[in-house]
Image (cartoon, rainbow, N blue to C red):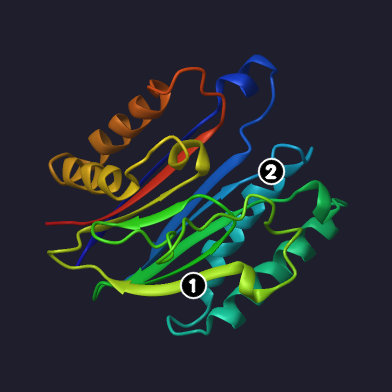
Amino acid sequence: MNFSISKTSVIGPAHLDLDLPNQDAVASKKRNGRWVVAVADGMGSRRLSHLGSKLATNLAVSCCLDNSQDVSAKELITDIYTQWLTGLYEINIEPNDAVTTLLVTWGNSKGDYRYIQLGDGVICSSNNNHSISEDELFSNETTGLGLSKKLSDWRTGRGKLDKANIGLILMTDGISEDIEDQLGFCNSILKRAQKGSLRAVKKNLKGLLHNWPTPHHTDDKTIAVVLINE
């Protein structure tokens, strides 16, 4: 199977008014039949979180592709976290000043995929919201890279993309917290994306985020879509 990846990030109105940077980040890559997507949301109260989120997404992408597809979640998370701390140290930034969430999915041409998540935001397929447990919404607003000390803070898992499960969506809480039916929203986006070109999908996503219907919304918004190509 072939996969397309569409992603976009828009700065929140509040940050725009205050001339602040977008604290969200998104990165993706495809290589040798494998793909990976990472989304991060820098904690607004930390002055350099925009740098922490960008570093986290770039490192997550490289770590997923440099490790084997079946690397243990513990080993991968340790690799990403260690490299993130090292990267900050090299540019004289304290981790506490660059706290960020991190959502990552990676997979292969057979449709097998895995995911890891630290902090809030949502990873959702056509038929499964991976960020909701059986009894409550998964939410760790107070944790992220730079704060988390426990592997148990991370949500991990795997799934399969096929004709019945056509894609995945990763989104920061600037989007997910405004949506009551997150699974329905994801499914709608994926079905609509099936009907358009890669360029059209990205244009539509950017238009959606720029014209977000929630009144008085202020947060940065980032979304990434992984879709099986027909």
| Element under disc 2 | loop
Amino acid carrying label 1: it is: Thr
Residue closest to the eye, 191 or 82: 191
What residue sits 51% from the left and 23% below the top?
217
Name the side, left or right, on which 134 lies relative to 149: left
Residue at the image position 61 percent from the left and 82 percent from the top: 75
66 lies above or below 201: below
Residue type at numbered disc 2: Met
Decide if residue 198 is on the left or right side of residue 46: left
- Mark 1 is surrounded, within 10 Å at the Cα level, by few (under 14), some (14 to 19) or many (20 or more) other residues, namely many
Query: Which secondary structure, mark 1?
Result: strand
Q: Quadrant of residue 42?
A: top right
Q: Going by the image, does 123 lie left or right of 201?
A: right
Mark number, residue 72: none
Residue 151 horizontal/vertical position (percent)? 65, 75
Horizontal side of residue 69 vs 219, given as left or right: left
Q: Which residue is mark 1?
A: 156
Give percent across and percent down for residue 182: 34, 46
Who's the residue at 79% across and 37% down the image? 47
Picture quadrant of residue 62: bottom right
The one nearer the camera, 155 or 102, is 155
State whether residue 73 appears in this view: yes
- Disc number at residue 43? 2
In which quadrant will I find the C terminus?
A: bottom left
The mark nearer the N terminus, 1 or 2, is: 2
Residue 126 rendering spot, x and y as whole percentages: 24, 56
x, y (%) of residue 44?
70, 37
Quarter assignment of residue 219: top right
